[in-house]
Image: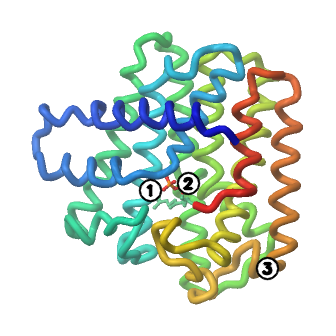
């Protein structure tokens, strides 16, 4: 894939993310520093990129929705900070840097995550080129994606399964990751489509794309934990096997997982058929999941 558009948009997103923090207005500069530390730590910026690419597919200009795009990345970053805490995965490294709590302490990491989640909703409302009644729909999508029946619920199922060393079936895994990881991808794609004025059938097609994207993303994440390069990924590999975690690889095999990922990518591409060239980027984005190394 030619990553020019991806890289250009990443630059726009990364500049905007820092501006969203409004550091000069921070009540406690240390909290703002902790938020900024994780927000600027790198990452693929997939969720904001998806917001914009979904809007493009409907015929709008993705970069016109930068605040909504940033809000999705702020929520993703919050989830990573909390996921790394000792009470959750207890990780020391993320995106090649020390995790937030290792630098700022656990209390501040909890606050930085909470603050990113909360501020994200205000950041959505900064999108003043979108009518208020449409922004309300976006807030609803994002709240559902991040909440107890989305990312939060998926994380909770994962936490319980780990505590009880429960073996999961493929269906359980699909349900858990569909919420933990997939729901935020779905919220990103649907938000971009909604602000761009998607017709119901377009929204349905893009939702199918998002769900297949989420599935392909998760399967390739599990594959990377087996075959990936620690230095490229920015966190230790092999942790799923060490922690006896159920994954698409451990429940099937490396080859079977690769086949499942390819099937999900094909279905995602199929879902884009009505959009023609306007969905070229969405198409390439999901296809490149199969070759990703981070
Ligand atoms: C109860 C509301 C509530 C919340 C709990 C902690 C938590 C919220 C959720 C955790 C969700 C989580 C960490 C999912 C993992 C998703 C995942 C595979 C992240 C990696 O995403 P990439 O590859 O990362 O897009 P980069 O670094 O590129 O941004």
Residue found 72% across the figure and 84% down from its top = 167
> From the viewer's perspective, is residue 199 above or below residue 159?
above
| Depth check, front residue: 73 or 9 | 9
Looking at the image, is mark 3 or mark 2 earlier in the sequence?
2
Q: Position of residue 251 (x, y in %)?
A: 79, 79
Residue found 36% across the figure and 71% down from its top = 85
The answer to whether mark 2 is within 8 Å of ligand 1 is: yes
Q: Mark 1 highlights which residue?
A: 79
> Pointer 3: residues within 10 angstroms few (<14), some, or many (20+)?
some
Q: Position of residue 181 (x, y in %)?
A: 61, 55
Could you say which quadrant of the image residue 229 lies in? bottom right
The answer to whether mark 1 is within 8 Å of ligand 1 is: yes
Looking at the image, is mark 1 or mark 3 earlier in the sequence?
1
Numbered badge on residue 155: none
Q: Nearer the observer, disc 1 or disc 2?
A: 1
Q: Mark 2 highlights which residue?
A: 151
Circles 1, 2 touching at the beta carbon (< 8 Å): yes
Q: In the picture provided, is 230 more to the left or to the right than 40?
A: right
Residue found 84% across the figure and 39% down from its top = 269
Distance between mark 1 and mark 3 Cα atoms: 26 Å
| Depth check, front residue: 177 or 30 | 30
Q: Mark 3 highlights which residue?
A: 251
Which part of the image, by quadrant, shows the C terminus?
Answer: bottom right
- Find numbered disc 3 in the image and state the secondary structure of the residue it sits on: helix
Distance between mark 1 and mark 2 Cα atoms: 8 Å
């Amino acid at each position: 894939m030619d990553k020019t558009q991806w890289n250009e948009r990443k630059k726009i997103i990364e500049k905007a993310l820092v501006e969203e923090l409004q550091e000069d207005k921070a009540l406690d500069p240390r909290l703002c520093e902790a938020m900024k530390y994780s927000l600027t730590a790198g990452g693929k910026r997939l969720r904001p990129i998806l917001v914009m690419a979904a809007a493009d597919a409907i015929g709008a200009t993705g970069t016109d929705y930068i605040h909504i795009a940033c809000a999705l990345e702020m929520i993703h970053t919050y989830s990573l900070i909390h996921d790394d805490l000792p009470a959750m995965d207890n990780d020391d490294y993320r995106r090649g840097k020390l995790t937030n709590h290792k630098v700022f302490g656990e209390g501040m990491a909890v606050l930085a995550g909470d603050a990113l989640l909360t501020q994200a909703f205000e950041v959505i409302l900064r999108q003043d080129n979108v009518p208020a009644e449409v922004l309300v729909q976006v807030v609803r999508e994002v709240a559902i994606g991040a909440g107890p029946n989305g990312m939060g619920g998926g994380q909770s199922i994962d936490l319980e399964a780990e505590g009880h060393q429960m073996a999961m079936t493929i269906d359980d895994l699909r349900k858990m990751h569909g919420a933990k990881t997939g729901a935020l991808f779905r919220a990103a794609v649907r938000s971009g489509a909604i602000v761009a004025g998607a017709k119901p059938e377009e929204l349905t097609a893009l939702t199918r794309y998002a769900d297949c994207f989420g599935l392909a993303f998760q399967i390739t994440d599990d594959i990377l934990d087996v075959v990936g390069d620690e230095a490229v990924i920015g966190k230790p590999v092999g942790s799923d096997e060490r922690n006896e975690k159920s994954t698409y690889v451990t429940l099937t095999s490396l080859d079977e997982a690769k086949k499942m990922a390819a099937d999900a990518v094909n279905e995602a591409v199929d879902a884009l058929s009505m959009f023609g060239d306007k969905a070229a980027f969405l198409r390439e984005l999901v296809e490149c999941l199969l070759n990703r190394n981070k």
